[in-house]
Every structure is written in C-alpha cells, then in structure tokens.
Amino acid sequence: MYKYTIKRILLMIPTLIGAGVLIFVLMRLIPGDICEIRLGGTGLAVDKDQIEICRENLGLNDSMPKQFFDFAVGVATLNFGDSMWTGRPVTEEIAVRFELTLQIAIMGTLAAVIIALPFGVISAIKQNTWIDYCIRLFSIAGIATPSFWLGIMVILGLLIATQHLFGEPWMMPITFTSIFADPVANLSQTIWPAVTIGYRYAAVVVRMTRSAMLEVLREDYVRTARAKGLFEKVIVNQHALKNALLPVITLIGIEFAFLIGGLVVTEQVFNLNGLGKLFVDAVLQHDFTLTQSMVMMVVAVFVLVNLLVDLLYAWVDPRIHYS
C-alpha cells in the first residue's frame, strides 16, 4: 500500500507539469492585453509608453522561458506571486473565497450521497415498478434541469413562501459569514446553493448506483446467496452494495473535484463570491498569474481526489490489494 501510494504521488508530478505548460501556453494565445484593459478602464487617453511601463512592471516583456521558469518556481515553492489585476497576493485572493466554495461543495456532496445511495438501491431492487419509475423520473429531471433555472426557482419560491408566512420576503445575505463565526447566518446563505447543486449531483449518482446495482444483482454469487436462504437485506447490504459502490465512488470523487472550480453559474445566481466567479473574472481580465494559479489548484484537487478514491477502493472491497 505504501509503495503504491508513493508511486501515485510521484505520478502526480508529470501531470502537474503538463497542466502547467498547457495553461501557460493557452493564456498567452488569448487575444488581448491586461495593461490595455487596466489603463483603458480609467477612461483617460493611454499612450504606448504607459502600456510598456505596465508590461515591464508585470514582467510581460520578459522572454517566454523566463516567464515560465518564474511560474514553475512559484508553483514548486507555493509562492504564486501577486495578481496582475488587483496587486494582492494570489494566495489571499484564493483564500478569501476558498472556504465558501469548499463548504458548498462538501454540503452538496453530502446531500447528494444521502439522497442518491438509498434511491439508487431501491430503484434497482424495485426494478420496473412504480417506485423505480418515480426515482428514474426524479433523476432524469435533475440531469435535464439547468442549475441556474433551478436556483432561480428556489429563490422565487423562498420569496413567495416567506412573503405569505411572515409578511416580508426572505432575502439572500449580501456578505458571506463564516460557519465558525455564526453557523445560523452561514447556513442561511449556503444551504440553498448546496441543495441546488446537490439535486443535480444526486440525479447523476442515482443513475450510476442503479445501473451498478442491477449489474451486481445479476451475478452468480448473488443467486447463490439467495439459494442459501439469506435475507434479502443481508444480500443487498453485505454482498451487492459493496461491489456496486466502486464506480459510484469514482463518480462522487470526480463530481466533488469539479465543484471546486465549476460553481460559476450557481454562484452568480445566489450572489456568492466564490472560486468560480473569481475564475471567470481572472480570465476576462487576462490576469495570467491568478488564472494559472487557480488552474494548478484545481488540477491538484483532481489528482488528490483520484488518489483518495483509489485508496478508498481497498477499504470498500477487501479483495483489492495494492502491491
């Protein structure tokens, strides 16, 4: 196990290097200049000398190899430099928003798992019954419903319901409150975005759980267990579910990693200043430093989650051994 873990960690290095080279090249292929955007936003006339001074200060006039070397050294030492747009350290820009995005991702994942696993198992056991049809309708609707539309419907529903019940409409908090400072205020801001993304998340996991369970329930060892007279509950929980969980765990891990940088639309709808919004702003502003750092962070999250998922396989299925 230890040797396998070390090998997997070492394999993360070429993945990160490849991602770094790719994002470095792609960012410089995007048309536009951050200095022109910054200076042009003042509304004053800008001459070429000012633009050249700006580029020199930001290091954009350096050769490409030197820029990439500085970027690589910064990633290796976890010193990502300053944002080209705000001038603040990149770590501060990310840290301010990371807690919010991570919390919503965790809450959405927990909501999805709590809903999806029982629904997926029940749908497989009750195949082609009205229960199965209802759960399949639930999952198909979750996949087909756009997240921004669902978020808008949630907000409108809350506004109408609170208006009728309390006489005044409920409004989303404007500023984010940490869960450690005020749990009630924090949950009032994060619970509904988590439910919104959790519904779609759960819909995908339900379908995967159902398909995996149906495949496992047709295996010979399940028929043998039934022939021995074991209770159906024991067969499902101890024999079928553990084997069906392997692809489900993979899907949960991938979806969770995606949520770290993929909550752009949900954050816009619920007026949340998270990593997704920061990602979009950094690209629009041609902030190379911030965009590259965020891409590397998301890539690191993906490879770490994949590593944890692989290690979790051995815990779920004792037949798997890493040598």
Image: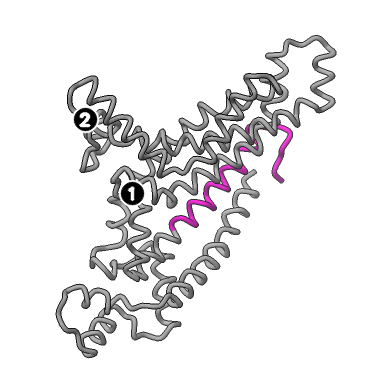
Residue drawn at x 62%, y 34% as measured from the top left: 207
| Position above or below: 250 against 215 | below
Around disc 1, counting alpha carbons within 10 Å, would you say few (fewer than 14), some (14 to 19), or many (20 or more)? some
Q: Label 2's element?
A: loop
* Residue position marked by numbered label 1 in the rendering: 268
Residue drawn at x 28%, y 28% as measured from the top left: 160
Residue 169: give its label. Answer: 2
Q: Quadrant of the N terminus?
A: top right
* Among the two numbered marks 1 and 2 on one chain, the one whose residue lies closer to the N terminus: 2
Q: What stretch is highlighted in magenta?
A: 297-323
Dot in front, 1 or 2: 2
Residue 211 x %, y %:
69, 33
Q: Label 1's element?
A: helix
Rounded to the nearest angstrom, the CA distance separating label 1 from label 2 is 20 Å
Residue 111 x %, y %:
46, 30
| Residue type beneath disc 1 | Gln
40 sits left or right of 200 in the view: left
